[in-house]
Amino acid sequence: MVEIVPLSVLDDASPMDDSNYDIFVLVANLGCKCHQGEIDKRFPQLNEYLKLDASFSSSVNLAVVNGKRLVVSPTGPLNRCEDDVRRFFDAGEAGIKRALATGAKKPAIISLHSDSFENATLVTLLGAYHALYTTLEHRESKPSEAKKAERLGIWSNNADSAKAVQEKAQNIEAAKTVYRDILGSDPERMAPKMVEKYVRDIFNGSCVSINVVEGAETLVKEYPCFAAVDRCANTVERHRGRVIWLDYNPGDAKKTLLLVGKGVTYDTGGADIKAGGHMAGMHRDKGGAAAVASFLYALTKIKPAGVRVIGGMAMVRNSVGSEAYLADEIITSRAGVRVRVGNTDAEGRMAMVDVLCHAKEKALNEHLPDPEIYTIATLTGHACLAVGDYTAIVPNGPYRRENLHLKLQEAGEQIGDQFDCSTLRREDYLFHKGKDEQSDVLQCNNKPSSQTARGHQTPAAFMILTSGLKEHGLGSDKPLKYAHLDIAGSSGPFPGLPTGAPVMALLQNYFF
């Protein structure tokens, strides 16, 4: 059970009269005529602040209105080409942080309706919740400080809007808490064994079933590429790798989602160990697995019908040991593809590719209805260079033919979880073609992705080739829709909190 600060809707016409809250946070565009009309009607005293301080409309400020504390958190402009719904996320987060700084424990958000952004109130609440999150280690070490606030309130001049998003905001925040807990916690607290325990705890008694594949011999047989990465740390019990399968099956599915997430609990770069200070933050290499658990946890709350979701979390620690997998080694994948290792710092694709192959087999052998397959990973530095703090989506031919990448991108725009679309080219497949008689596929070159042309697109081609998905492309009589989501830039800053990308967009796309 994941606990979050409870959210209530204020029904009063005059929200600041509600004695259940000790501070109020106004999120509005102070330069908007419609918002200014509401301010004149409800908070006329703020006009005096605007006259006294020219920066009042562009910075977070504390005001006193009718003897009550009111934090004014402006969204800033909303009508320029570069403005999007995240203006409300940022204002909600900044406003709650300012409210907490006053010592308040019962904040309520006053959200003024936006005609431009349908999900403005929801995204404002997600920003507020982001500010209210307390890290797992802190919750466990100091239980008395587990919650930054006792309650959270929401009021909108569009009452239906506030009521409509109350449950949705709490469900998304609960899912994002799972994401932050797994991705943000250190490599000991979230070693593979501890991730399994955490996942078993949160799904205990839920509508999601769990199956864990572990043990060195079993992994070598079932997931040989994964096992190659795992063998360097599998002599340490808590660091032994495992693949955690999660299954939400409503029983009437007309569509199936299969998600495979990278869960490298600490990325040293393998035998080609990271140096020069680049080890900092490498516990954040489990974002794909965190996203899978987060997405499935959301389903325990919303319980959608008609869609089955299967998630595979590839949990492994990439360390340096006497059995570390090596450059130039040849490993035969689950699909029977001979892979020559080119770069031991490209372990993420190795950890995922056999799990992806297994997901492909499930889709085909179990005749799953209308399958769509994803890999999700904090995979490449190249994605950070190419698309910055956004998710890079790299679709295969069948996925792209149905414009599913554009559909997912639009869903992300609506909820503030944005994507940039990339395209697989013939060069990406040629890059990974085996260069000798012993190998079918070359895993990578010996350069970092950030120094490799098309460095975030080619991993998708590698996984398509090595998993056998290449046989289910546009020319196949059994095409499978597949997309790779690189969240290296979008998963969150370090230091800083994980974002939850791409879980919000996936939920918006398929269920909201």
Image (spheres, grey):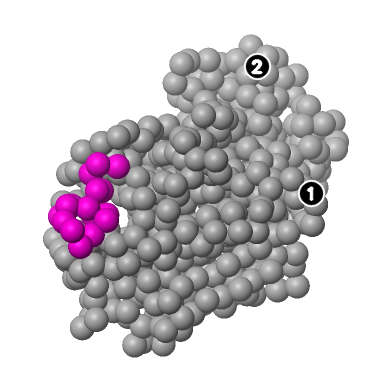
Q: Position of residue 509 (x, y in %)?
A: 63, 37
Q: Which mark is residue 362?
A: none
Q: Position of residue 461 (x, y in %)?
A: 35, 45
Q: Residues within 10 Å of mark 1 (few under 14, many from 20)?
A: some
Report the residue marked by disc 1.
305
The span picked out in magenta is: 429-446
Residue drawn where x is 68% and y is 14% of the image:
34
- Please tell me which residue lies in front, 144 or 282: 282
Q: Picture quarter containing residue 105? A: bottom right
Left or right of residue 321, residue 393 in this image: right
Residue drawn where x is 47% and y is 63% of the image:
355
Q: Picture quarter containing residue 278? A: bottom left
Left or right of residue 243, residue 298 in this image: right
Please name the predominant secondary structure of the magenta segment in the image: loop
User: Cβ–Cβ below 8 Å for labels 2 and 1?
Assistant: no
SS category of the residue bearing label 1 = loop
Q: Position of residue 168 (x, y in %)?
A: 72, 45
- Please tell me which residue lies in front, 124 or 250: 250
For marks 2 and 1 on the same chain, the one whose residue lies earlier in the sequence: 2
Q: Amino acid at mark 2?
A: Gln
Is 439 one of the magenta-colored residues? yes
Residue drawn where x is 46% and y is 73% of the image:
222
Q: CA distance from mark 2 to mark 1?
A: 43 Å
Left or right of residue 131, residue 272 in this image: left
Answer whether residue 371 is visible to the viewer in this image: yes
Report the residue marked by disc 2.
36
Q: Amino acid at mark 1?
A: Ala
Answer whether residue 345 is visible to the viewer in this image: no
Looking at the picture, does residue 446 appear above or below residue 215?
Answer: above
Residue drawn where x is 29% and y is 42% of the image:
429
SS category of the residue bearing label 2 = helix
